């Protein structure tokens, strides 16, 4: 029976990973291989997509083609320049993809940090203290997740334009922090509820203050929940598309909307889009892999009560 379960899970995992495999293969295909019919499974790998992703290019004039080919044969051009020359183009400068990826790191990282910090204190208060209207407050916090982001995009755009927060890192960090806070509070409250209050009582009897008991007793016990909450908040902020598209234009534009709008001179650069998606996927996959045990605990919190 266990062998059958393992086989079924393996087959399902392979089916779900098919889009990832296709994306990886597309990232290393040439433009001709990407649009070939039927699709090529076996092909000669190339970094053409990464060249399109990381550079701005221009068509090489016929008068300069012979000189550039001679320079390429003499080894005077680097690898990216030689790949671009094979498609009849010359690199004119770097693209803005690295800047967009850096914006994603800054905005997603700081908003996740603030969401988790505020969520820890709020969840501890809801879990330990008799707050008037606690259930109503918790429902109000949860209700902020019920509204689709696209519904509030236009009001937020008008408000941000008045407050000079449009296309700023601060505006996006505040927005993602607010939207992630409800998730952080509810997840962390579940973990706080599972920590026996007797631990804190014993610590305060020994002379600890409430904050010392929270810092030295509760936080280490809730480390698993904090790590799981961090992963969930990071995934939302990292992948968010609607707000990033509508509330940014240049300075604070993140990677998701810039990848989706990537166009080349001869049409859509599918290999560049796949390469950008692959580069965008790797960091969050790495973080999730490092915290995978905590993530599993996070999706099962509250299943076992003391």
Image (cartoon, rainbow, N blue to C red):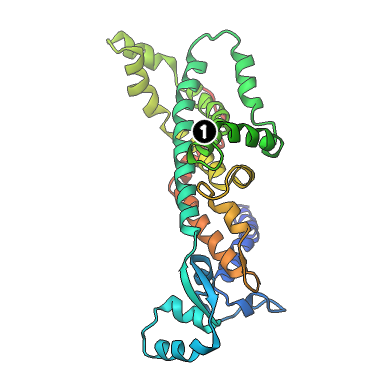
Query: Does residue 290 appear to the left or right of 160 in the view shown?
Result: left
Where residue 166 appears, x then y in whole percent?
56, 39
Which is nearer the eye, 72 or 6? 72
Question: How many numbered callouts?
Answer: 1
Which residue shows up at 58% across the image and 55% down it? 258
- Residue 301 in view in this figure: no
Which residue shows up at 48% across the image and 92% down it? 66
Where disc 1 sits, the SS reads: helix
Q: Find residue 271 and report its image quarter.
A: bottom right
* Whether residue 144 is situated above or below residue 100 in the rendered picture: above
Where residue 257 appears, x then y in whole percent?
60, 52
Query: Does residue 30 appear to the left or right of 91 in the view shown?
Result: right
- Residue 226 in view in this figure: yes
Residue lying farthest front? 63
Residue located beneath label 1 in the image = 174
Where residue 303 appears, x then y in whole percent?
57, 30
* Whether residue 87 is situated above or below residue 211 in the rendered picture: below
Which is nearer the eye, 210 or 69? 69
């Amino acid at each position: 029976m266990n062998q059958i379960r393992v086989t079924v899970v393996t087959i399902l995992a392979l089916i779900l990973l098919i889009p990832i495999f296709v994306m990886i293969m597309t990232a290393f295909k040439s433009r001709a291989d990407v649009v070939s019919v039927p699709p090529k499974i076996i092909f000669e790998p190339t970094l053409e997509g990464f060249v399109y992703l990381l550079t701005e290019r221009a068509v090489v004039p016929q008068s300069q083609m012979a000189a550039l080919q001679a320079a390429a044969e003499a080894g005077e051009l680097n690898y990216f320049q030689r790949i671009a020359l094979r498609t009849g183009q010359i690199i004119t400068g770097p693209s803005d993809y690295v800047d967009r990826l850096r914006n994603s790191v800054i905005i997603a990282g700081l908003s996740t940090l603030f969401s988790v910090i505020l969520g820890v204190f709020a969840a501890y208060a809801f879990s330990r203290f008799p707050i008037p209207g606690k259930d109503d407050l918790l429902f109000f916090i949860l209700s902020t997740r019920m509204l689709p982001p696209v519904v509030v995009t236009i009001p937020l755009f008008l408000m941000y334009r008045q407050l000079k927060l449009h296309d700023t890192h601060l505006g996006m960090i505040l927005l993602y922090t607010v939207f992630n806070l409800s998730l952080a509070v509810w997840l962390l409250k579940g973990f706080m509820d599972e920590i026996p209050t007797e631990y804190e009582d014993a610590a305060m009897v020994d002379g600890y203050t409430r904050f010392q008991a929270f810092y030295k007793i509760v936080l280490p016990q809730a480390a698993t929940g904090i790590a799981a909450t961090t992963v969930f908040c990071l995934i939302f902020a990292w992948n968010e598309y609607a707000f990033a598209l509508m509330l940014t234009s240049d300075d604070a534009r993140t990677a998701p909307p810039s990848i989706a709008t990537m166009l080349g001179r001869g049409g859509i650069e599918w290999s560049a889009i796949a390469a950008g998606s692959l580069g965008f996927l790797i960091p969050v996959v790495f973080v999730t892999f490092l915290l995978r045990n905590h993530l599993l605990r996070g999706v099962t919190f509250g299943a076992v009560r003391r």
